[in-house]
Image: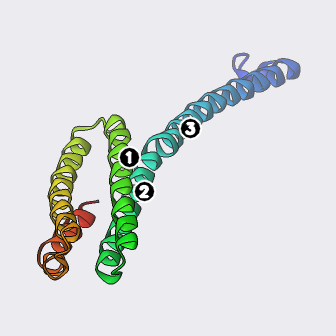
Amino acid sequence: MSTKGFGNLRIGYRIGLAFAATIVLLIVVALLSVRSLTSVNNALHAVTKDYYVKVRLLDDIADEVDLQARQVRNLLIFDSPEARATNIKVIETSYASVTALYARLTELVRQETGKKLLAEVQIRRAQYAKDIDAFLALVRSEQIAEAKAYLENALRDSQRTYMASL
């Protein structure tokens, strides 16, 4: 028998070495776990504090545009000047809300891809706003038949394009 090697050590010393090796492995596992949990925490933070906020803002914008569309149609349905004035006021208030939502969204978008997409949406929004303004001008001047034709021929298409880009 050889006098060298692990087998020739006293039993207490061997148990101590095995225990020390177990502790070292446990520390390695703990460090890897902490690093992995930090990575998961960062990803969760990105989702809840960045991505979700942007998606929520876009959803709020889509809700406001949908509200505007309903009010536009109401302008053609209801003949009362009071009802029309209320519908126009709702559209104008909603448009102001959308402008504020876009301001918040613009602050949050940092990546170039996001900035390009937001710029494209803003271009479609500008066309939609121009069409809404033209439609409202027709309604204010009591040209309801022309407003209806404008809705069918121009406004509806720009709204669909705008909503699709959201």
The image shows residue 65 at horizontal and vertical percentages of 33, 63
Q: Which residue is mark 2?
A: 60
Is residue 19 left or right of 106 when viewed as pictured?
A: right
> 6 or 132: which is nearer to us?
132
Q: What residue is at 80 percent from the left and 22 percent from the top?
A: 14
What distance separates the C-alpha of mark 2 from that of mark 3? 27 Å
Is residue 40 left or right of 141 when viewed as pictured?
A: right
What distance separates the C-alpha of mark 1 from that of mark 3? 28 Å
Going from N to C along the chain, the mark reached first, 2 or 3, is 3
Q: What residue is at 18 percent from the left and 76 percent from the top?
A: 151
Going from N to C along the chain, the mark reached first, 1 or 3, is 3
Is residue 141 left or right of 52 when viewed as pictured?
A: left
Disc number for residue 41: 3
Report helix, strand or loop for mark 1: helix
Q: Amino acid at mark 1?
A: Leu
Q: Amino acid at mark 2?
A: Asp
Label 1 close to label 2 by CB (< 8 Å): yes
> 84 or 158: which is nearer to us?
84
Res 7 visible: no
Report helix, strand or loop for mark 2: helix
Locate the C terminus by quadrant.
bottom left
Q: Height in image: 32 above or below 150?
A: above
Label 2 close to label 3 by CB (< 8 Å): no
Q: Height in image: 95 above or below 156?
A: above
Q: Quadrant of residue 133?
A: bottom left
Q: Which residue is mark 1?
A: 101
